Image (cartoon, grey):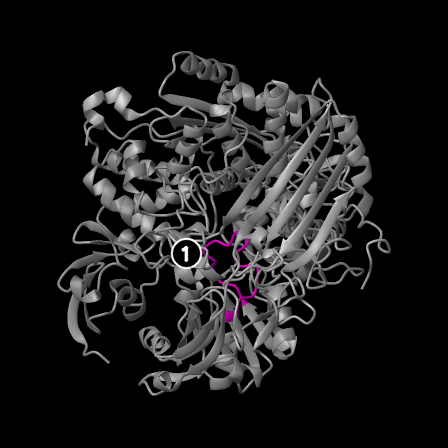
């Protein structure tokens, strides 16, 4: 395997007349770049004809129900399956013992740990998988699961990260040889000595503890699969809620021993992913094993509580941030200590060289000369994970830290948070910018974005209104929160990023048919992002075709080229780049055919982007359309060219992309009740050149909703016994339409210089950027009373407590008069 | 196994006879016995609304009722929307609204949203944005942030209002979207 130093950067892949065009030069009125094309995939969804995993029905299909542990930490003494097996309609009950015969009782995680598929010895988190009941009907499978009798010997659990590091803490992973505590790893980045020195020499330093609580992606469709072993052809087909079908095929093959060409993963319509559908879960393995053993298709679809309690969570970082600065507000150093709760297994889904993901982006949009991060990760009796929930591998936590710390420093310096940001922004002429922790930012113009957002939201007027309310001692406080984030997406350069050793390239295959219609097959996989439209637009732009004449296929490993999937905002930066480059390969061949048809030398042929034609230089009336060329490529192919018109590209990006934005959140806090409402949210995003502004705006809306939900109400909570008390939609609250404002969106365009079409990716920016903006707004509303930080989520009771501690809470009795407080 | 019960439900205008266990949820009867898989399941607690159908004129969560409770009733699912009298040649205005206003992404909550939207507009043909937000607050969407769903239902309100040539017509359309 190659090391980071051996392999040079991947080259820029700009065709001679391609390259990132300025956005205003893109588009041709037939669904090219920059056009708000209505989505091609919508029709089947609005007609109720989507094809999600649970919609799949196969002859002889059986149903799997998992038996789960009610305890967070317990040794299994005995499992009695006899009563379940005796039931009519129950076909089989699988335990670890049965799976062990096929070497499937455990499976590897993406971070080199080993997770139980079914527990053989000790349960390590509540609702962990203990047995699987396979029956003819989903109701019977549930009945069967209730009749599996498991005897447990309960062990003391450890839930809290700090407590897990105590000397006398119960050891979660006594199954690992030599593991006598709960510590998993220590990771560090940056220059500790230089940073220490910056702090010693600083005029001003600030320090703040903050927790980024445990949340869950919670797509509305839970995880599931239909596994179908075809004994006659020795072939395993798994219809899977998968964000990465090709990687999942490789992993399935490696785990099961079934040769990879005999494994087919089909990711049908996926009802939202957000990172939740990147890992392999035990239920998939049990279903596949059951199908293999029984020779019949087996369906497993999670219930919501199973999804929230056992599939990958996100965040769960306890952080202490520090900033050093001069007295005029120039930041000279940034440091952070993190305690990361990984749950019962080290199963975080991130590139293997990055145990803390991209967290070292924590210097954000600011030119900070010294920086140092250190992290310790611990095992606890909570569900495993650490997924990049709509986030490029821990960038969300990093940006939360720096954006909160900027406000803490602004408060210390008594500066406006906008002014402090301006003072420290990386300037446009500094790009490509080498950060203190070793990233190379591709492009950015942060100050323009911030100024435009502040102008758009009416920042000065909002500050005046805030002041007016304070002077009048009003019941409702106004808080204005800023966030000027930078993202790091598009994983990634193969030399840096991998999944299970596979470099994180992506791919596209373009076939133009004799009648000039095209089929595009891509290695990335949509879960609502709209690839069937936006990837068709890339091809339409580069080939001049009408977007209606292009069909995009994805999600079937038998037909699509290998790709690493859709997460970490990597589809457009990597898969979109592959699509553009493949299309340019087609266009290069088309040019040669055009020359043959027009009977001129190839150098005399020029491409006209707006009309989608090749023209003879100096004789503009002599032209040929791509449709005519497609026909000629099959019916009159030149002597020196292969027939047909198609190309494939596997794209290894030279660098990550760095989209950014400037967000302003306005909250109103009721001093009587603690009720906090997001009144306005103004989001300016810069994702480079835009493919479909309508789709981008939709992505931004959705990400804002998730980021606001994180700040305001979502949390996977546990009690001291390890019981998950936030494990269903009664207790894990997603925002409804009532808790969200109508969003105000805006944009600037700073193309990525290394991306073939100058795009950067956008899906995750709004989740990354919105949560700190909300936190900053909440603190901003009460900072005049000396408050520097309030922990999320901002439920009324928590905010009321902060108000009360700050002396800002109002007793309703004062307003209602004496009588109201009498019992 | 508990004895099955014969029931009759008129689904999307067609009378369907079913034999179901008394404990079978209506959503499972719709999805698995009638093969109408446009109605989805997103939670087990009645919170998400992905299973919303219109039963006897009212939007209900079909995971919170047993199939036997729907005996003798009329049920409309998303698959029946395009055949309703106020539908256009191809789609119902609410369905068009979701496409035109980009009111869906992954599409999983969409059928439930469409059915809730239909019941809402039947009750209140010209709702304010606030009324729409309240009306769909029993339906969770994880992709759109609801902004464009509100616009989608307003689109349908305007289209249906235009069609009826109501005295003061539909509300003016938001001119923000670009044409395809």
| Image x and y of residue A55, in percent | 39, 66
Q: Nearer the viewer, residue A356 or B78?
A: A356
Query: For residue A572: magenta?
Result: no
Look at the picture and state if A803 lies above or below A541.
above
Look at the picture and state if B179 lies above or below A632.
above
Query: For residue A280: magenta?
Result: yes
Residue at the (52%, 51%) spot, across then down? A274
Q: Is residue A42 visible?
A: yes
Q: Nearer the viewer, residue A689 or A606?
A: A689
**Horizontal side of residue A699 vs B30, given as left or right:** right
Highlighted magenta segment, given as a residue range = A266-282
**Horizontal side of residue A152 vs A1, given as left or right:** left
Which residue in the protein does label 1 denote?
A727
**Horizontal side of residue B155 vs A187, given as left or right:** left
Rendered-image quadrant of the C terminus of chain A: top left
Residue at the (42%, 28%) spot, across then down? A803
| Image x and y of residue A308, in percent | 45, 57
Look at the picture and state if A86 lies above or below A335.
below
Q: Is residue A61 visible?
A: no
| Image x and y of residue A477, in percent | 41, 22
**Horizontal side of residue A349 vs A592, given as left or right:** left
Element type where label 1 sits in the image: loop
Helix, strand or loop for the magenta stretch, by majority:
loop
Rendered-image quadrant of the N terminus of chain A: bottom right
Q: Chain of mark 1?
A: A
Residue at the (48%, 46%) spot, across then down? A39
């Amino acid at each position: 395997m190659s090391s980071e130093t051996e392999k040079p950067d991947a080259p820029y892949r700009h065709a001679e007349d391609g390259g990132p065009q300025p956005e205003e030069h893109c588009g041709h009125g037939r669904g090219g770049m920059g056009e708000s094309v209505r989505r091609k995939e919508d029709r089947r969804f609005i007609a109720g004809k989507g094809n999600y995993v649970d919609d799949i029905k196969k002859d002889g299909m059986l149903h799997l129900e998992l038996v789960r542990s009610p305890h967070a930490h317990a040794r299994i003494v005995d499992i009695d399956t006899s009563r379940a097996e005796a039931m009519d309609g129950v076909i089989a009950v699988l335990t670890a013992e049965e799976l062990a015969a096929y070497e499937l009782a455990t499976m590897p995680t993406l971070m080199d740990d080993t997770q139980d598929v079914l527990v053989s010895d000790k349960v390590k988190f509540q609702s962990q998988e203990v047995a699987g009941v396979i029956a003819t009907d989903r109701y019977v499978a549930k009945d069967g699961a209730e009749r599996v009798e498991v005897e447990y010997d309960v062990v003391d659990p450890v839930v809290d990260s700090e407590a897990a590091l105590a000397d006398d803490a119960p050891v979660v992973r006594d199954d690992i040889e030599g593991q006598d505590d709960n510590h998993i790893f220590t990771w560090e980045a940056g220059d500790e000595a230089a940073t220490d020195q910056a702090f010693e020499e600083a005029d001003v330093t600030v320090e703040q503890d903050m927790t980024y609580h445990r949340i869950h992606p919670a797509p509305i469709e839970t995880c599931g699969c239909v596994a179908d072993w075809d004994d006659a052809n020795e072939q395993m087909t798994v219809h899977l809620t998968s964000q990465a079908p090709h990687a999942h095929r490789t992993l399935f093959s490696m785990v099961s021993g079934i040769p990879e060409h005999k494994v087919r993963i089909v990711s049908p319509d996926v009802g939202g992913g957000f990172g939740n559908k990147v890992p392999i879960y035990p239920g998939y393995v049990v279903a596949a094993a059951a199908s293999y053993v029984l020779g019949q298709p087996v369906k497993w679809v999670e219930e919501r509580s199973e999804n929230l309690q056992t599939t990958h969570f996100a965040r769960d970082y306890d952080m202490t941030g520090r900033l050093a600065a001069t007295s005029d507000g120039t930041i000279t150093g940034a440091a952070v200590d993190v305690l990361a709760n990984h749950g019962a297994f080290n199963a975080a889904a991130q590139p293997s060289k990055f145990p803390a993901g991209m967290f070292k982006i924590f210097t954000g949009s600011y030119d900070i000369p010294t920086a140092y991060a250190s992290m310790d990760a611990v095992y606890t009796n909570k569900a495993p994970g650490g997924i990049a929930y709509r986030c490029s591998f821990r960038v969300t936590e990093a940006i939360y830290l720096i954006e909160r710390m900027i406000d803490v420093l602004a408060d210390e310096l008594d500066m406006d948070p906008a002014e402090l940001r301006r003072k420290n922004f990386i300037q446009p002429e500094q790009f490509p910018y080498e950060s203190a922790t070793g990233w190379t930012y591709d492009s950015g113009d942060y100050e323009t974005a911030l100024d435009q957002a502040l102008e758009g939201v009416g920042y000065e007027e909002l500050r005046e209104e805030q002041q007016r309310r304070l002077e009048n001692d009003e019941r409702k406080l106004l808080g204005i929160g800023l966030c000027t984030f930078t993202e790091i997406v598009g994983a990634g350069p193969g030399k840096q990023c991998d999944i299970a050793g596979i470099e994180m390239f992506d791919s596209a295959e373009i076939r133009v048919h004799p009648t000039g219609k095209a089929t595009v097959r891509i290695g990335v996989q949509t879960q609502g992002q709209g690839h069937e439209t936006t990837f068709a637009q890339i091809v339409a732009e580069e080939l001049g075709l009408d977007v209606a004449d292009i069909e995009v296929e994805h999600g079937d490993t038998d037909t699509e080229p290998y790709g690493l999937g859709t997460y970490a905002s990597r589809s457009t930066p990597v898969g979109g780049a592959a699509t553009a480059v493949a299309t340019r390969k087609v266009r290069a061949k088309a040019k040669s055919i055009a020359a043959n048809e027009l009977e001129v030398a190839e150098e005399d042929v020029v491409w006209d982007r707006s009309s989608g034609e090749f023209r003879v230089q100096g004789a503009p009336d002599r032209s040929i359309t791509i449709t005519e060329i497609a026909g000629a490529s099959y019916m009159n192919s030149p002597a020196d060219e292969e027939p047909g018109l198609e190309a494939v590209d596997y794209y290894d990006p030279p660098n990550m992309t760095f989209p950014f934005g400037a967000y302003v959140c306005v909250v109103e806090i009721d001093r009587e009740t603690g009720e906090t409402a997001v009144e306005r949210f103004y989001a300016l995003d810069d994702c480079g050149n835009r493919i479909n502004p309508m789709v981008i705006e939709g992505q931004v809306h959705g990400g804002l909703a998730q980021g606001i939900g994180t700040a305001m109400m979502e949390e996977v909570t546990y009690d001291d016994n390890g019981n998950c008390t936030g494990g269903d939609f009664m207790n894990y609250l997603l925002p409804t339409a009532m808790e969200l404002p109508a969003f105000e969106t805006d944009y600037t365009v700073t193309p990525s210089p290394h991306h073939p079409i100058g795009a950067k990716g956008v899906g995750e920016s709004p989740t990354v950027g919105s949560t700190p903006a909300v936190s900053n707004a909440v603190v901003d509303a009460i900072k005049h009373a000396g408050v520097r930080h309030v922990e999320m989520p901002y439920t009324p009771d928590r905010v009321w407590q902060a108000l009360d501690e700050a002396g800002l809470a109002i007793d309703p009795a004062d307003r209602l008069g004496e009588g109201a407080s009498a019992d | 196994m508990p004895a099955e019960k014969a029931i009759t439900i008129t689904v999307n205008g067609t009378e369907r006879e079913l034999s179901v266990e008394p404990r079978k949820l209506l959503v499972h009867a719709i999805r698995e016995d009638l093969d109408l898989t446009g109605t989805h399941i997103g939670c087990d607690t009645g919170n998400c609304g992905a299973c919303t159908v219109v039963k006897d004129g009212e939007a209900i969560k079909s995971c919170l009722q047993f199939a036997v409770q729907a005996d003798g009733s009329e049920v409309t699912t998303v698959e029946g929307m395009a055949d309703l009298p106020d539908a256009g040649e191809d789609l119902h205005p609410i369905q068009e609204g979701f496409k035109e206003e980009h009111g869906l992404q992954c599409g999983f909550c969409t059928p439930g949203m469409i059915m809730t939207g239909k019941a809402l507009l039947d009750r209140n043909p010209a709702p304010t944005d606030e009324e729409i937000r309240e009306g769909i607050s029993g339906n969770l969407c994880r992709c759109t942030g609801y902004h464009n769903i509100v616009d989608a239902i307003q689109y349908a309100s305007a289209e249906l209002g235009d069609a009826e040539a109501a005295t003061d017509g539909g509300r003016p359309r938001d001119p923000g979207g670009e044409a395809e």
